[in-house]
Image: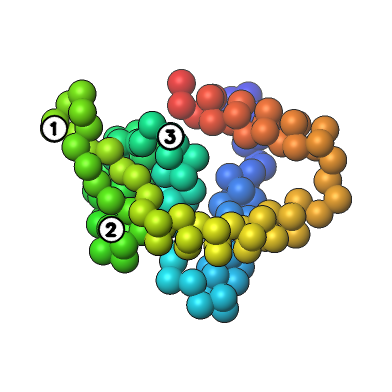
Amino acid sequence: MTTNPADNRAYFFKIDTTIKKIRLILQKKIDDAKIDLTVDQWVLLDHIKRNEEFGISQNELAEMTVKDAPTVTRIIDLLVKKGFAERSMMPTDRRRFMITLTDAGRDIFEKAYPIVVEVRRKGWGDLSEEDYKNFVKILDTIYSNITH
């Protein structure tokens, strides 16, 4: 059997532990700021905000966040219950819902965003733009390799 250097490199473990640490730190900062939001709710809120001009469907949110449909539905239900998002029927397909932010959702986004930026900046430290490009290229390649 031929071995490959990647056989003994647990790179996914490094990725996973880094993500978990970032999530823990971000959640603590959100909690310390007394913002009623989880990291998973933030992720959806962020994607809804980015697609605010045209709205976004639950299926699109699931695809963008790589979360299964029931999880996305549950998180949206919580965002709606908290008054941060609302569902409306898509004009082109009455079987699908478009998710948009409410004014309260935009407000909570504005409160949470600086905290997210702070954690991103701290994590990135003094890495360069070139580092970022290489990082994204490597992650995109791993994603593509594992997906195809």
Q: Tell me the CA gap for discs 1 and 3.
A: 21 Å
Give whichever of 52, 2 is nearer the camera. Answer: 52
Q: Amino acid at mark 1?
A: Arg
On the image, numbered disc 2 is attached to which residue? 80
* Mark 1 or mark 3, whichever is nearer to me: 3
Q: Position of residue 104 (x, y in %)?
A: 40, 61
Name the residue at the front extreme. 103
CA neighbours of label 1 inside 10 A, class few (<14), some (14 to 19), many (20+): few
CA neighbours of label 3 inside 10 A, class few (<14), some (14 to 19), many (20+): few
Decide if residue 135 is on the left or right side of residue 22. right
The first of marks 3 and 2 along the sequence is 3
Are the two marked residues, 3 and 2, in contact with CB atoms closer than 8 angstroms? no
Q: Tell me the CA gap for discs 3 and 2.
A: 19 Å
Q: What residue lies at 75% left-to-right and 31% top-to-bottom?
A: 134
On the image, numbered disc 3 is attached to which residue? 53
In terms of secondary structure, where does tag 1 sit? strand
Decide if residue 46 is on the left or right side of residue 123. left
On the image, numbered disc 1 is attached to which residue? 95
